[in-house]
Image (tube, grey):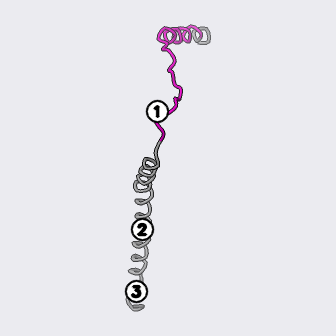
Amino acid sequence: MSVLRPLLLRSLTGSAHRLMMPAAQVHSKRPQEQLKVLDINIGLTYCFMCCLLPTGWIRYTWRATRSRSEESCLPSSFD
């Protein structure tokens, strides 16, 4: 098997060399226009509404549900 391994590797990499693609030109450019204060505020508001509000609602609901379930576990003689 060790004798065939270099031949196998050479045949696999040979086909890859023939299919070689040119490298992508990935360079950052200066923005065409600067972000305005209104654009930044809209973006931050959107992030707040999509990420932080649902998390807060879930935590609030979880705490309220947990406190109600603890109250329902008490025997009726303690009311």
Q: Nearer the viewer, mark 3 or mark 1?
A: 1
Vertical placement of residue 1 versus 33, above or below: above
Q: Toward the viewer: 28 or 72?
A: 28
Residue drawn at x 56%, y 7% is 7
The amino acid marked with disc number 2 is: Trp
Any mark on residue 75, and which?
A: 3
Residue corresponding to mark 1: 32
Q: Are marks 2 and 1 in contact (CB under 8 Å)?
A: no
The quadrant holding residue 71 is bottom left
The mark nearer the N terminus, 3 or 1, is: 1
- Pointer 2 residue: 62
Q: The residue tagged with tag 1: helix, strand or loop?
A: loop
**Percent x, y of residue 72:** 38, 80
Query: Residue 31 location in percent, x, y?
Result: 49, 34
Q: Quadrant of residue 79?
A: bottom left
Badge 2 or badge 1: first in the primary sequence:
1
Magenta segment? 6-34
Relative height, residue 68 to residue 43 (above, below): below
Q: Position of residue 56 (x, y in %)?
A: 44, 63
